Image (cartoon, coloured by chain):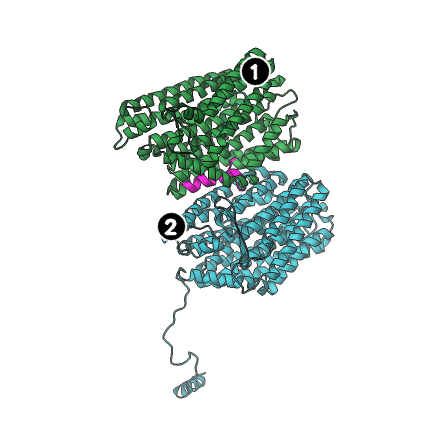
Amino acid sequence: MDFAHSFALIAPELLLSVAGLALLLVGAWGGDKSARLVAIAAAAALFGAGFMLVPGLHFGVDGPATLAFGGLIKVDSFALFAKALIYLAAIGALMVAPAFFNSEAAGTERGMRAEYPVLVLFAAVGMGIMVSANDFMTLYLGLELNSLSAYVLAAILRRDTRSGEAGLKYFVLGALASGILLYGMSLLYGFTGGTAFTAVRAGLTGELGTGALFGVIFVLSGLAFKISAVPFHMWTPDVYEGAPTPVTAFFATAPKVAAVALTARVVFEVFGAQVDAWQQIVMFTALASIIFGALGAIGQENLKRLLAYSSINNVGFILLGLAVANEAGVSAMLVYLFIYVAMSLGSFVALLMLRDENGALFETFADIRGLSVTRPLIAWALLVFMFSLAGIPPLLGFYSKFVVFQATIEAGLVAFGAIAIAASVIGAFYYIKFVKVMFFDEPVDVVTGKSGAAHWVLLGLTAAIVSPLGYLLTPSLTDLADKAAASLFLAV
Amino acid sequence: MEGFPILSLMMLVPLAGALVCLVAGAATARWIALGTTLVTFVLGVLLWSNFQTGGAQWQFTERAELFAGFSWALGIDGIALMLIMLSVFLMPICILASWDAIQKRVGEYMAAFLLMEVLMIGTFSAQDLFLFYIFFEAGLIPMYLIIGVWGGDNRIYASYKFFLYTLLGSVLMLIAMFWMVAEAGTSDIPTLMQYDFPPGAQTWLWLAFFASFAVKVPMWPFHTWLPDAHVQAPTAGSVILAGVLLKLGTYGFVRFSLPMFPEASAQFAWLVFALSMIAVVYTSLVALVQSDMKKLIAYSSVAHMAIVTVGLFAFNVQGLEGAMIVMLSHGLVSAALFLCVGVIYDRLHTREIARYGGLAINMPYYALFFLLFTMASIGLPGTSGFVGEFLALAGIYQASSLVALVATTGIILGAAYMLYLYRRVAFGGQVNEDAAAMRDISVREWAFLAPIAASVLWMGVYPESFLAPMRADIAVLDARLAAAAPASDSALTAGAPRAEAANALSHENGANHSSAEEGAH
């Protein structure tokens, strides 16, 4: 085993782990006064780790050279693409945090705690391991590292009961999901005799026995929990609503990318020989997520809750790409993921900017009435995000739906695509409600707080990506996604 | 024919204007919007004057491969040219019509209108299937805002209804587009217009496109969004909605449904006929009992658009030409009627018919214009309405006398509700003091009513100017449809020729016979 090669492959994870540990010490000795410094350093570490991915992303890497530690980890283009997205989302979550935690209304006595950036770093390491897992053991390690960090993040506002509740709910349900996943893995191990993806795949050829089928279903159920796909989505609205908004922004983006990428890897690399077995499950989950995500959102008054349902709805479209079960579908899914991250991050940043003079956040529709008159820039940005989420051209959200549905139809799943796209109209209903409330209703003028430069930068950046200007990114985005998808299929 | 990219320029000018308006103050925004729309109109005139009638089918083509399967392919034929002209002609009028009526958020309002103009020109000139879809669908955003922000009391309900109805129709069309592109291997519209899809697939594709276009036209029973949207939209919003946006639906039939799926079109012709016949009679009757002027005109729009669809699916040249002229004429006339309503609405702030009366006394010029447009809407000879409806009905008579019969009742009912409206508004005594005190139309109102009146008369007296550019394209379409055209119920069959004419005078026995008959008298 060539350790130098293996370590070179996991250099980003190493960097992030070392940075995380070092910053933990800084935080421990420096106290919460050093939180801002820690956050900046953490963002820099993420940026540096992201920079390490660039050559691999650009040239595309696949084949045996990407295997590390005897095949426990595989750092191919697919993993790199997912990691790049995860790091970007994590940087975003770090950028918006200080202003939120340092405001009086957050209830934190000493402002942001130094643990927050460190936990984000560890979560990012966990997610990096998830997406490059090539063995069920690695998969579980990464998943748990990420999940445990996430549970703490959800509950990080100790004095806020909602935050505590969110953390507890997330933990209990997440543990249940992990249990289901583990049980599925143990079944697969029992029926195939291995935990490595290649070994399990080799054991799953031919007719699928009942036990192995149960293994497949349990593994998929556990993963569906992590990506909050229907019917395992119930925790999402509660956790998203209760968790502090920067943490919600993080949950809605990075872990979604990781879990979706992981699911894609598992279904193709492990269950690749049994497409019929999992395709129906993914198709059902996709459709159910689109429909229930849209229906559940309709009656919501709380904006964070609404965006939680919106994320369930979007997961449906992402899974649509997966359900196609070919390279074009995966590529479309990755493009969708990128655009989804930009849209969600932007929406949550906009929510974070809805604050009064003390920094208390507004979270309901009643508070943003007539926002277009009082805070036109935020309102227009939200308008762009909402129409984009609804998939209205010429915004980039249309492109994400475009590629996914194109892949669906080209694969011959016409009826499936038609039902899914018709259901997307239900989703449009609540997205345009945002616009209605902000633009058509009489202003209430409660949003008076100022926002920091970090928020504006992030809002402007994501809005620019989602606006028609974002189409300029699509050639390179498509190129990267194609390479990533190709590397996933080459391995098979 | 690669030349000066005038179509792109026609979109760039309003787009730039829209961006400037967004940040400009109210007064500047108005002038900028007027300036840009006039410049675009001038460009449109240049476009028309450089269009070679009888030249290549697709002119002013531009093509640039963009990213990810999209290409910036533009080009127009005569049909598109006429509809673009209609759009750029109505735009400055819309801006003028909202000059004083819109007082809040003027910059955003003007920007939304200019954006609409970009999208309409784009829709009519797109030669790439997906580019068409983007333009077609993007219009939802500005129109949603126009209705919702500047509309009447019940605007929110109307804006939701408009948005969701149209979106649901369009997404199914998108699925069909994906399938077509996968099947034909190209998203180039002129190529697809010649591509023969398998008849079985055509059925589904036709239905998917129909879902979108039928909502846009709108055809009965998908029309219910229209009266709400019209009534609640500001005057200029109604003008654009009735003048141009409804034409997107029928344009879709001309550009996609008929040439791309001729067999399915023939198969479903009776569906279209049935819906159109119901629309003509039903919506005309509904229009008769309206007490709100805008609602009345909105329902009359549904009836007129039904004549268009009937003409289109007649599968012959007269029907197609008639349908095109009705589209143009209705674009002008309904726009003008909404403007007429807007003129008095601005003064009295009500659309209730009963609140007016006797306007011919205190507003003679207004009454004159209103009368002209009323007559044009009825289809009086000499106005544009007559030309279009006559051709369309002549076309459909060749296909089915029953449909022609029912559709023609629409003209009679049209006369009934329009004249009834006119009588109540303009004639009779001056029952309402405030209505009697209204002053006649101002210079600004002259400026937007007179050009439409001139165009209506022009199209009525010399329709050749408008038909000539479209003739070749309609002939191509007719040739494409010829193979699939359904059998007609009024086709004349050639009988055995008689030896002599029925009224011929015979020279031998006949002479005696007739004289004998005469003698009997």
**As displayed, is residue B194 above or below residue A33?**
below
Considering the image in quadrants, where does the C terminus of chain B appear?
A: bottom left
Q: Residue A199: which quarter of the image?
A: top left
Q: CA distance from mark 2 to mark 1?
A: 62 Å
Provide the secondary structure element on which disc 1 rests.
Answer: loop
Identify the amino acid type marked 2.
Ala
- Badge number at residue B201: 2
Q: Which residue is mark 1?
A: A113
Identify the amino acid type marked 1.
Arg
Report x, y in % for residue B306.
50, 53
How many numbered discs? 2
Considering the image in quadrants, where does the N terminus of chain B appear?
A: bottom right
**Residue at position x 58%, y 12% from top?**
A30
Q: Is residue B152 magenta?
A: no
Would residue A475 be visible to someone looking at this image?
yes
Q: Which chain is cyan?
A: B
- Mark 2, residues whose alpha carbon is within 10 Å: few (<14), some, or many (≥20)? some
